[in-house]
Image (cartoon, helix red, strand yellow):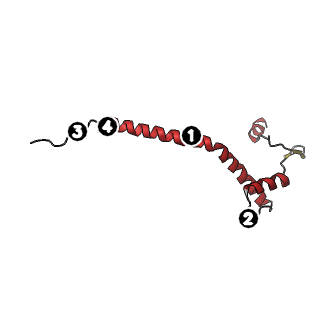
């Protein structure tokens, strides 16, 4: 009997794992690169979502407002204030308030 099945040297377990490893490596580089590139856009969308929610609660948000209109309305109508509960004084905030550091200090 003649064995007609010829074993291809490219069909080995080691080569299969090598291809899988390279594929995983390439995919992880692509996903990591996309995460780094899109980080600034993601942060901008998070800020826009917060501004949209604040304007909605204040009753200033209109349906289908563009991002530029939301940011413009937020910047003109909303200002951040900090209330010191110990002295009951209100101070203007320039956005540099760090809640975590305040909680650690108190």
Which corner quadrant of the image does residue 57 belong to? bottom right
- In three-dimensional space, the C-alpha distance between marks 1 and 3, rounded to whole angstroms, equals 40 Å
User: In the image, what residue occupies the spot 59% across and 43% down?
Assistant: 35
Going by the picture, which residue comes out furthest to the left? 1
* Residue located beneath label 4 in the image: 13
Query: Would you place residue 20 above or below residue 56 in this image?
Result: above
Element type at mark 1: helix
Which corner quadrant of the image does residue 66 belong to? bottom right
Label 3 vs 2, first from the N-terminus: 3
Going by the picture, which residue comes out furthest to the bottom? 63
Report the side of 97 relative to 21 (left or right).
right
Label 1 vs 3, first from the N-terminus: 3
Query: Toward the viewer: 95 or 37?
Result: 37
Element type at mark 4: helix
Crowding near the residue tagged with mark 3, few <14, some 14–19, many ≥20 C-alpha atoms within 10 Å: few
Element type at mark 3: loop
* Residue located beneath label 3 in the image: 7
* Residue located beneath label 2 in the image: 63
- In three-dimensional space, the C-alpha distance between marks 1 and 2, rounded to whole angstroms, equals 35 Å
């Amino acid at each position: 009997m003649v064995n007609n099945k010829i074993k291809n040297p490219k069909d080995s377990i080691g080569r299969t794992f090598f291809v899988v490893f390279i594929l995983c490596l390439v995919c992880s580089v692509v996903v990591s690169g996309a995460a780094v590139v899109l980080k600034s856009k993601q942060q901008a969308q998070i800020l826009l979502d917060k501004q949209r929610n604040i304007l909605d609660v204040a009753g200033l948000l209109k349906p289908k407002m563009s991002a530029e209109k939301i940011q413009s309305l937020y910047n003109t109508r909303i200002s951040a204030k900090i209330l010191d509960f110990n002295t009951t004084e209100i101070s203007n905030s320039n956005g540099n308030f760090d809640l975590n550091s305040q909680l650690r200090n108190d």
